[in-house]
Amino acid sequence: QVQLQESGPGLVKPSQTLSLTCTVSGGSISSGSYYWSWIRQPAGKGLEWIGRIYTSGSTNYNPSLKSRVTISVDTSKNQFSLKLSSVTAADTAVYYCAREPMVRGVTYFDYWGQGTLVTVSS
Amino acid sequence: DIQMTQSPSSLSASVGDRVTITCRASQSISSYLNWYQQKPGKAPKLLIYAASSLQSGVPSRFSGSGSGTDFTLTISSLQPEDFATYYCQQSYSTPIFTFGPGTKVDIK
């Protein structure tokens, strides 16, 4: 059973960089045809896809966040990471990591981490 | 960008009711539509993928239909554990994904 677990600071100051890591257990991050995504959800609001990475290092980002986002992968640690720079209060949200299998062109998020709340405040 | 809308934004229903939630895309997305259930304080859970395929382990009272721009999620007989918020998500414009705003199902 694949499990994902987010980790990182719960409080980030405005203008600084938010950094989170997702640790994958129960399977190798490099096995199979999977993308690994970050998704966030402000309190009481809907879900926003941030970006994804393939184990080759290939990335895709939400155009609305692209200038501030970097996603990387460390296959030796079975982890992938998110960096979001120049944060403001609008970046306060629960951040989820998720797995996205590629099955004959169909894609969806089948495993999710429990989520971690990141608050941007001085 | 493909925009997703859902209706209603919330509904009240009783255990045993048949519940239908609608999701509409701003342009045709073929059958690239997924449904998720989210309970308070929890991560979303995949219910339906590719518009009508039931994810493994999901009860058969959940079903999905539609193609093009209009989709529905149906719960044939609402159970106490089904009170939650439901989101649709398009994967047509991969690698850019968008979610609907959600439909909250609560107890009547």
Image (cartoon, coloured by chain):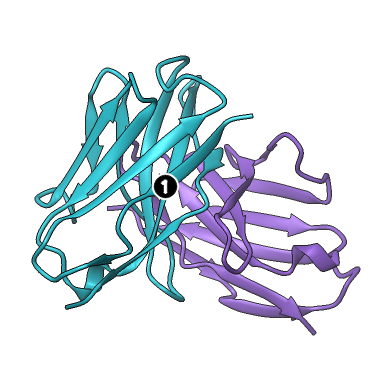
- The correct choice, above or below, for B66 with respect to A86 in the image is above
Q: As drawn, is A68 to the left or to the right of B57?
A: left
Q: Residues within 10 Å of mark 1 (few under 14, many from 20)?
A: many
Chain A representation colour: cyan
Q: Residue at x 61, y 50 (%)?
A: B45
**Amino acid type for the residue under numbered disc 1:** Glu
On what subunit does the disc labeled 1 rest?
A
Percent coordinates x, y for residue A10 in the rendering: 33, 63
Q: Residue at x 58, y 60 (%)?
A: B42
Q: Residue at x 76, y 63 (%)?
A: B82
Percent coordinates x, y for residue A78 in the rendering: 39, 25
Quarter of the image with the N terminus of chain A is top right
* SS assignment at label 1: strand
Q: Which residue is mark 1?
A: A6
Chain B representation colour: purple
Q: Residue at x 68, y 79 (%)?
A: B11
Percent coordinates x, y for residue B36 in the rendering: 59, 52
